[in-house]
Amino acid sequence: MTVQADNQRQESPDLADQTCAACGSSNLRFVVNVPQVPAFCNVLLDNAEAAASVRRGDIQLVYCEGCSFLFNGAFDASVLAYSPDYANSLSCSPSFGSFLEETSERLVEKHVLNENTVLELGCGDGDFLTRLCTIGNNRGFGFDPSYFGPTTVDAGNGVTFKDRYYTGDDAVEADLVCSRHVLEHVEEPLEFMQLLAGAASKSRGKLYVEVPNATYMLEKPAIWDLIYEHPGYFTDRALVSVAEKARLSVSESSATFLDQFLYIDADASGSATESHKSKTTSLSRLDQLVSGFRDEVENSVKRWTNEVQRLAVDGKRVVTWGAGSKGVTFLNLVDSSSIEHIVDINPAKHGKFVPGTGQTVVGPEALVEYQPHLVLLMNGAYENEVKEMIRSLNVDATVKVVD
């Protein structure tokens, strides 16, 4: 796969007709083109043939010089259709479970959520909402078209799930409205933020929003975070900007989960007297990071392609660990034909195949027989957890974090 980049605005034919969906600006810059990636990273396939024939799309990353929002100028929503087959939950990981627990406890304490009502838009498998309700004995309502499970759960004062999108007509008066890792999936982030603000304003007006951290993606750089499922990428400045444009008062913005995620606490009462943007990354710094990102993408893809090919020539058995967005993107961007397996601790993924490249997903126990020489770990947040698991299996393999 060839990654293409160019600074010249005229070489992106559709750019002149586009505006930023977060702020409406036409002051845009083309960053990098990553062609023909799988439309879904988080839908694994039943066989290698289906994996090879998945729908694909281009990522034409565009940067808004007005608000620092990044978006895919080639995004086509018709390529995607979310269903219960969509599985991006990380709750099987003890490390991620600890993060969810800490976040839940913080929100319950900060907003004094005791026997109150919590609403989550894009609740996924419902784990986070259930934790919030259990900790504070709260009542919960979760909406998500990909939700697959019981409609009610006996946690706290009861949790109700709807396998559909939330609308402004849903009569839920929530003391806290949450949305985690949803905003980056919508084409019109301002409209969605306004929907969140409207939901929050029905009661106490408190709102928590969490997204992948595009500031981290640019700084690291974390190029494997580029996926077709995300039409938008939020720097800290962009997230605050779109929230304030939706008339939300942002009280806090911060990176979390080893800086990989970004969150804001906001209020729909409109009581802010000054903008929170002064506490975020400056436009000049973001401009500098964006200017160097295309070279980072090209260099990383080239370096890892060469490394994987060298390992194959040396007869080394290599597996990747983490059959989520990062792992699927890595396997599709580099020449990964010599890699047979990707490891994941989620049993629901075992026996499935990676979209685009067709590697089989196996559980950690499969490494006992396969005995790889090298495990390429797609997310350093799980390094200690993975190393301990490999030691417990008596697998003599080196773990290397893919950067």
Image: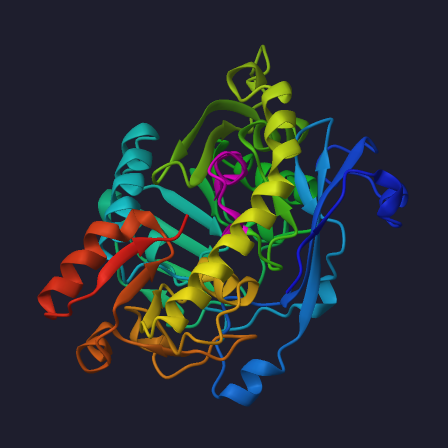
Q: Is residue 145 above or below residue 75?
A: below
Image quarter in which the N terminus is found: bottom right
Residue 101 left/right relative to 281: left
Residue 5 lies, with reference to residue 111, above or below; the image says: below
Instruction: Inspect this view and state whether residue 346 appears.
Output: yes
Residue 384 location, x and y as percent?
A: 20, 50
Magenta stretch holds residue 224: yes
Residues 180 and 79: in front is 79
Horizontal side of residue 63 vs 12, given as left or right: left
Figure check: 343 above or below 91 = below
Q: Which residue is drawn at 71% across and 61% down?
A: 58
Tell me, yes or no, whether the highlighted magenta stretch contains residue 281. no
**Residue at left 47%, top 86%?**
46
The x, y position of residue 47, in whole percent, is 48, 88
- Horizontal side of 165 relative to 351 (left or right) equals right
Q: Nearer the viewer, residue 325 or 314?
A: 314
Q: Which region of the structure is painted magenta?
A: 210-225
